[in-house]
Amino acid sequence: MQWISNLTNLTIHIGNTSFENPIWVASGTFGYGTEAPELVDVNQLGAIVTKSITRQPREGNPPPRIVETASGMINSIGLANIGVEKYIKKLLPIYEGLSTKIIMNIAGTDIQEYVEIMEMVESVSSAIAGYEINISCPNVKKGGMEFGVDCEMTAKLTETLRGITERLLIMKLSPNVSDIVSIGLSAENAGADAVSAINTVVGMSINAKTGMSDIFTTYGGLSGPAIKPIGLVAVHKLYQQLTIPIIGIGGIVSGEDAVEYMLAGATAVQVGTANFRDPGISENIIDSLKNILNESNRKVAADLIGTVQTH
Ligand SMILES: Cc1cc2nc3c(=O)[nH]c(=O)nc-3n(C[C@H](O)[C@H](O)[C@H](O)COP(=O)(O)O)c2cc1C
């Protein structure tokens, strides 16, 4: 509805980059962003965060690697992806033709792997807006999480990558830690432009009839509406202590959910699991956000950030 969009301002800024709206799609839940152009007008999205990319292609974990749970799902995909060479060759040229912002998510088992991937992408010309660094994947034996649970390793990785790129550098935090704020502060002090929170929450699902664990790797990552309260806490706590923007993730399915995350302190949000039910849901969330702002006479989305009132 054009008349509504004329009245509201959804633009948000992170570092020196502006985004047309704060509704992004989350890594691993929207493929590479190019799969279903007939279902979704991706240029309407604030940004697409692409699936985690590793140096070499990965098959991921054996099945079963997804199970539905109450108000959510558990996955243990294990970073299945095409590898950075194919990403550069096949996908970067396609991204040139999109007007939405592309954030490339990178995963690795050691600092060298993250560095190599980023250097390879930086060495070619491309229009990607920045990187989200996955230091929080609970579903691989080596790497990822080992960085995300340790302040020193988070700082070292952030600082090293900061030296390689001037594009946006977003560190993606894990909720599976005792103190997410200290990890976030380590990323901020080492030069990150933003942090995103949260990745999935470690979970388990068991079939009572067969006595079997439902996921091949026994544990997996819980996502969906079940984790929204955990994501809100993470964003609210990070907002109290950090000065860089926070991107809220976890269980967002509606415009109200997005508003709640922004009130808690998020500058932008990412929609994840909800894409599996409806890949076009983010467009509805953008419309709903406009309506909510309009009805509340708060015309500027960024004015919501961190304004939650507590008792
Ligand atoms: C099937 C699946 C695959 C995912 N793959 C990735 C990934 O490759 N890299 C990453 O950083 N996060 C990955 N995630 C985590 C999501 O990006 C997001 O942080 C998490 O699901 C919480 O958001 P949600 O509750 O809206 O799904 C994945 C999540 C799901 C459900």
Image (cartoon, rainbow, N blue to C red):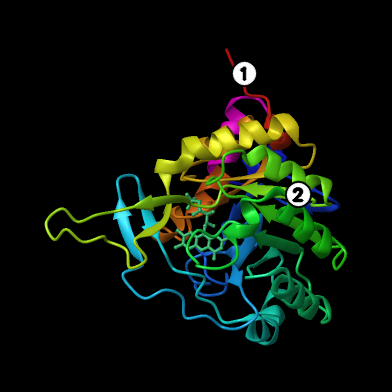
Where residue 94 sits: x, y (%)? Answer: 67, 79
Q: Amino acid at mark 1?
A: Gln
Mark 2 or 1: the one toward you? 2
State the SS at label 2: helix
Q: Which residues are magenta?
A: 288-299
The answer to whether any part of residue 94 appears in the image is yes
Residue 246 appearing in the image = no
Q: Tell me where residue 167 appears, x and y as whole percent.
A: 83, 62
CA gap between label 2 and label 1 equals 27 Å
Whether the magenta-drawn stretch holds residue 227 is answered as: no
Which label number is shown at residue 309?
1
Give the left or right position of residue 113, taking residue 174 as reference: right
- Identify the mark nearer the N-term, 2 or 1: 2
Q: Residue at x 52, y 47 (%)?
A: 176
Q: Nearer the viewer, residue 140 or 21?
A: 140
Q: Main secondary structure of the magenta part?
A: helix
Task: Find residue 187 and name its label.
Answer: 2
- Quadrant (top left, top right, bottom left, bottom right) of the C terminus: top right
Name the quadrant containing residue 107: bottom right
Residue at 13 percent of width and 61 percent of height:
210
Q: Indicate the secondary structure of the residue bearing disc 1.
A: loop
Amino acid type for the residue under numbered disc 2: Ala
Front in this rendered view, residue 85 or 277: 85
User: Residue 191: where, in percent of width, then height?
Assistant: 84, 52
Measured along the vertical axis of the image, is residue 310 above or below residue 261? above
Residue nearest the observer in this picture, 82 or 76: 76
Residue at (44, 68) in percent of width and height = 77
Q: Residue at x 67, y 27 (%)?
A: 298
Q: Is residue 267 left or right of residue 214?
A: right
